[in-house]
């Protein structure tokens, strides 16, 4: 089956965590990925070569690989250069995701997409924040466009408070000929369903599934509100 068909209509679980946290270890992230696949995930999104290698040993589903790295003078940090892309492909990545926003970058976007295709022979997922960026990335040859960066660029920060950007998914689905992936602030199964209804090819969920500390904190905060209410005179 075609690689993109394998993820169509499915859930991709993002298994990421800062290296200085209890979850930020290759073996732990790989275990999270294996558990996600057992639950029905059709793909995994993972960051850094060492984590991708560990995940690859435990799962057979497609891996969307990224390499988060901050470079001086450039705001893009998701797989910013070809060498970062090469590193994650060598580690076992099936699809490379890159920052495809309209910001300063160390390598022209069209050139990066072309080199990944020609030299690494894998599909490219363009992480974008606006409709215009999605259209441009698709025209440059990206195989998928994802709403990952909506709310995380200076010119889209106002969208963060409104949850998953289902509107952008619907707009992209009408304007680009490549698959659209909904990623970012998917907080519930209902959000994921709405994304598919809006035209998403697949849905990526991370924090709501794998960020144990974040999910725990949400429960604790809500319970503390009730405790404070009970203590009121």
Image (tube, rainbow, N blue to C red):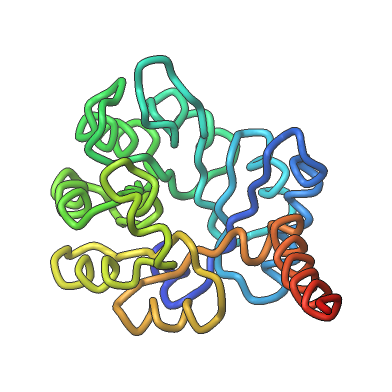
Closer to us: 166 or 112: 166
Closer to us: 185 or 197: 185
Q: Quadrant of residue 41?
A: bottom right
Answer above or below: position of 210 versus 85.
below
Residue pictured at 16% horizontal, 72% vertical: 174
Q: Quadrant of the C terminus?
A: bottom right
Give the x, y percent position of residue 188.
56, 77
Closer to us: 74 or 230: 230
Q: Is residue 214 toward the left or the right of residue 198 in the image?
A: right
Answer above or below: position of 87 versus 122.
above
Residue found farthest to the front: 233
Give the x, y percent position of residue 152.
39, 46
Residue pictured at 55% horizontal, 81% vertical: 189
Q: Is residue 90 toward the left or the right of residue 134 in the image?
A: right
Q: Is residue 209 toward the left or the right of residue 31 in the image?
A: left
Residue pictured at 44% horizontal, 36% vertical: 78
Residue found farthest to the top: 72
Q: Quadrant of the N terminus?
A: bottom left
Give the x, y percent position of residue 133.
20, 48
Give the x, y percent position of residue 218.
70, 65
Answer above or below: position of 133 versus 112.
below
Residue pictured at 28% horizontal, 31% vertical: 112
Q: Quadrant of residue 13?
A: bottom right
Q: How many numbered discs? A: 0
């Amino acid at each position: 089956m075609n690689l993109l068909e394998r993820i169509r209509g499915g859930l991709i679980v993002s298994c990421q965590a800062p290296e200085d946290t209890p979850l930020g270890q290759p073996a732990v992230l790989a275990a999270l990925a294996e558990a996600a696949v057992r639950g029905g995930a059709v793909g995994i999104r993972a960051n850094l070569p060492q984590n991708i290698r560990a995940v690859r040993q435990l799962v057979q589903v497609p891996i969307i690989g990224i390499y988060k790295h901050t470079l001086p003078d450039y705001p893009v940090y998701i797989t910013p250069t070809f060498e970062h892309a090469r590193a994650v492909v060598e580690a076992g990545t099936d699809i490379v995701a890159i920052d495809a926003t309209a910001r300063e970058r160390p390598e022209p976007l069209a050139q990066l997409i072309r080199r990944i295709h020609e030299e690494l022979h894998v599909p490219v997922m363009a992480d974008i924040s606006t409709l215009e960026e999605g259209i441009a990335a698709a025209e440059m040859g990206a195989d998928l466009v994802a709403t990952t960066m909506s709310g995380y660029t200076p010119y889209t920060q106002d969208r963060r408070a409104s949850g998953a950007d289902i509107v952008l998914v619907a707009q992209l689905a009408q304007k680009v000929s490549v698959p659209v992936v909904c990623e970012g602030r998917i907080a519930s199964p209902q959000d994921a369903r709405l994304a598919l209804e809006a035209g998403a090819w697949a849905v990526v969920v991370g924090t709501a599934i794998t960020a144990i500390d974040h999910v725990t904190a949400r429960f604790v905060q809500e319970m503390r509100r009730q405790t404070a209410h009970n203590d009121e005179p």
